[in-house]
C-alpha cells in the first residue's frame, strides 16, 4: 500500500511532517507493508495535510489529517473524500502546468518522465530556435508574472540579438501577498521549471540560466537545488542536453527578499551583486540584461508552462482560454474564503464564479465586500464587477489587472480606507528610491489618506492627483500600479472614505 503525504511547505506548516512520521511509526508497530511517498500539494489548502491512500484502486483522499487520526486512517475507519480526482474543487480544473504537482514525488525524475516529463524538451532538441519560438508564439502564452507580455515575442527579440553569450533568468521572487503558485510548483514539480528553462535556452541560443528565488522560501530553495543536481547528473542539463549537441546549465540564486526585486531590472541588478534598484528602460533586458547581455526574464509559471506547449502543441494549449487570453490561468485563492488554494483552468471564468462557486464564499459567512486581484498592487474589485471574465483585456476594461493571478477575498467588515492606506504604506516601505513619484509620492499618499481619515474631504482631490502622477511618472510597476488599489478603494467604496468626514463633522 502506498500512502502519499505532501512535503509542500503549506502542508508542513499544518503538520504534514508529524503526520508522515506518525504513519511510519504506526505502520511498523502493526507490521504493515506501507510505502510513504512525500509528494507535492494538490492545491486544496483547506484539506491539508491531505493524505492519499492507494491500495490499488485509485488514490483516496483524507484531510485534514492530524496525528490523532493516524490509527483510524490505517484501520480504514477514517472518513474519506473519495477519489482525489473526483473532489469537486479538483475535478473542475484543467491542469496543464500543474498536471504532475501533487501526483509524483518532486525529485523522482523517472516518475516525472513516466507522467509526460521531458517530452517537450526532446521535441525541442529536434527543432531550430525559430521553430521553438514560433510554437510558443502560436500558443498565445503570455507572461504570468504580471505584465502579460507575449512570451514568444520576448523570446524572438533575444533570439535575434547578436551576442557571444545569452541568458535565461527565471523570476522566482514571488512577493505578492496571496500568491503561492511559484512556490508550489517549485516544491512539487521542479523538473518542469528546469525543462522549461532548457527549452527557452535552446530557443534563443542561451547556454546559461539562473533562478532568482526569495530567501523566504527555504523549502523551495532546497528542492530546486536538489533537482538541478539530479538533472545535471542525469544529463538533462550540461554540455550535452539529453545526449544532444546542445548545451544548457543553470544555477539557483537566492535574494534577500526585497519586494522590488520582483521587478525584472531590479532583479538583474541584485543577481549581478548590486543593490536591487530599478533600471531605466530602454535598453530592454532582452537586449542588455544580465551582465549587459541579451536575457530572457520570465516568471516561474511562464517557464513551467513551456514544456506542455512543446509536448502537446501550440494549438492544444491555445484551445483553452478566452479572447486574447489563451491557455490556462493558475488562480491562487486566498483571504477570507471557505476553500482556498490553487485552481488551474482556462481563462474566461467570471470573478463571481471563482469567489462564490469555487471558493465557496467567505469563511466568516458574511457577505463578500471586495476581492483584490493581482497582489498588493491590484485593484479592489467590488461585487458589482463580479461579472468580469478572467482575462487580461477584460480586467483592464474594468480598471483592474490580473497580475500573478492571486485573489484575496474580504468580507463586509473590511475598511477600504485602511486598505488604501496599507497600499500606500507598502509602496513607501518597499520603494527602491530610484524615482521621485514612487519614493516621495507614496509617503505623501499615506499622509493624504490620513487627512481624509481625519475628516478633510478636500484631500480626496489631492489624492487623485497624486495617484495620477505616480501612475504616469514612476519608473516601474511598484509606484506605477500602487494607484490601482488606492483609487479602486476610493471609487468603488466611497462610503468608507466619506464616513470619516461625516464622523468628524
Image: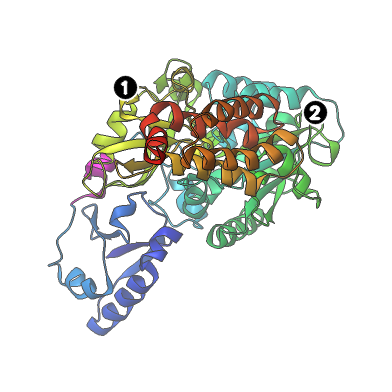
Q: Relative to 477, is 140 on the left or the right?
A: left
> Camera-side residue: 445 or 15?
445
Residue 49 seen in this snapshot: yes
Local SS, label 1 = loop
**Label 1 packing within 10 angstroms: few (<14), some (14-19), many (20+):** few
Q: Residue furthest right?
A: 164
Q: Which mark is residue 287?
A: 2
Marking on residue 387: 1
Write down the region rendered in magenta: 82-92
Q: Going by the picture, which residue comes out furthest to the left?
A: 77
- Residue in the picture at 30% in, 46% down: 337
Magenta stretch contains residue 340: no
Considering only vertical position in the picture, is 413 above or below 2? above
* Mark 2 neighbour class, 10 Å CA radius: few under 14, some 14 to 19, many 20 or more: many
- Looking at this view, is 299 or 501 the one in front? 501
Outermost residue, top direction? Answer: 323
Above or below, comparing residue 228 to residue 26 in the picture: above
Give the quadrant of the N terminus. bottom left
Answer whether residue 247 is visible to the viewer in this image.
no
| Residue at 51% in and 22% down | 314
Vertical arrangement, residue 34 with respect to residue 95, above or below: below
Which is nearer the N-term, disc 1 or disc 2?
2
Amino acid at each position: 500500500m502506498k500512502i502519499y503525504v505532501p512535503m509542500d511547505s503549506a502542508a508542513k506548516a499544518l503538520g504534514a511532517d508529524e503526520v508522515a512520521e506518525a504513519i511510519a511509526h504506526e505502520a511498523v508497530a502493526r507490521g504493515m507493508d506501507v510505502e510513504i511517498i512525500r509528494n507535492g500539494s494538490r492545491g486544496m489548502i483547506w484539506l491539508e495535510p491531505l493524505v492519499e491512500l492507494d491500495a490499488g484502486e485509485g488514490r483516496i483522499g483524507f484531510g485534514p489529517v492530524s496525528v490523532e487520526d493516524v490509527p483510524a486512517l490505517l484501520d480504514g475507519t477514517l472518513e474519506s473524500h473519495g477519489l482525489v480526482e473526483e473532489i469537486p474543487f479538483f475535478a473542475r480544473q484543467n491542469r496543464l502546468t500543474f498536471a504532475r504537482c501533487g501526483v509524483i514525488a518532486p525529485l523522482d525524475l523517472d516518475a516525472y518522465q513516466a507522467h509526460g516529463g521531458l517530452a517537450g524538451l526532446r521535441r525541442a532538441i529536434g527543432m531550430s530556435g525559430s521553430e521553438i519560438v514560433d510554437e510558443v508564439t502560436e500558443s498565445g502564452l503570455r507572461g504570468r508574472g504580471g505584465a502579460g507580455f507575449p512570451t514568444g515575442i520576448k523570446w524572438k527579440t533575444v533570439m535575434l540579438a547578436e551576442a557571444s553569450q545569452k541568458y535565461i533568468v527565471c523570476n522566482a521572487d514571488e512577493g505578492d501577498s496571496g500568491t503561492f503558485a511559484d512556490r508550489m510548483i517549485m516544491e512539487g514539480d521542479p523538473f518542469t521549471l528546469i525543462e522549461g528553462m532548457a527549452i527557452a535556452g535552446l530557443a534563443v541560443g542561451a547556454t546559461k540560466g539562473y533562478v532568482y528565488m526569495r530567501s523566504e522560501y527555504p523549502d523551495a530553495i532546497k528542492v530546486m537545488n536538489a533537482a538541478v543536481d539530479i538533472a545535471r547528473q542525469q544529463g538533462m542539463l550540461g554540455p550535452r542536453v539529453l545526449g544532444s549537441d546542445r548545451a544548457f546549465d543553470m544555477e539557483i540564486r537566492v535574494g534577500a527578499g526585497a519586494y522590488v526585486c520582483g521587478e525584472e531590472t531590479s532583479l538583474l541588478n541584485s543577481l549581478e551583486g548590486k543593490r536591487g534598484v530599478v533600471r531605466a528602460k530602454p535598453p530592454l533586458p532582452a537586449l542588455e540584461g544580465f551582465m549587459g547581455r541579451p536575457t530572457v526574464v520570465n516568471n516561474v509559471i511562464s517557464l513551467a508552462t513551456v514544456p506542455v506547449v512543446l509536448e502537446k502543441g501550440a494549438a492544444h494549449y491555445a484551445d483553452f482560454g478566452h479572447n486574447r487570453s489563451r491557455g490556462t490561468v493558475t488562480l491562487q485563492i486566498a483571504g477570507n474564503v471557505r476553500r482556498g488554494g490553487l485552481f488551474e483552468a482556462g481563462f474566461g471564468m467570471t470573478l463571481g464564479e471563482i469567489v462564490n462557486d469555487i471558493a465557496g464564499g467567505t469563511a466568516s459567512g458574511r457577505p463578500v465586500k471586495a476581492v483584490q486581484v493581482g497582489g498588493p498592487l491590484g485593484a479592489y474589485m467590488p461585487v458589482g464587477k463580479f461579472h468580469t471574465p478572467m482575462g487580461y483585456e477584460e480586467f483592464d476594461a474594468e480598471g483592474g489587472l490580473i497580475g500573478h493571478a492571486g485573489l484575496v477575498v474580504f468580507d463586509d467588515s473590511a475598511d477600504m480606507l485602511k486598505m488604501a492606506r496599507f497600499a500606500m504604506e507598502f509602496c513607501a516601505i518597499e520603494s527602491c528610491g530610484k524615482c521621485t513619484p514612487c519614493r516621495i509620492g507614496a509617503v505623501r499618499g499615506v499622509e493624504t489618506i490620513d487627512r481624509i481619515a481625519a475628516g478633510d474631504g478636500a484631500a480626496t482631490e489631492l489624492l487623485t492627483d497624486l495617484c495620477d502622477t505616480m501612475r504616469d511618472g514612476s519608473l516601474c510597476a511598484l509606484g506605477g500600479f500602487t494607484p490601482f488599489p488606492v483609487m479602486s478603494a476610493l471609487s468603488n467604496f466611497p462610503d468608507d472614505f466619506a464616513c470619516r468626514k461625516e464622523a468628524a463633522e
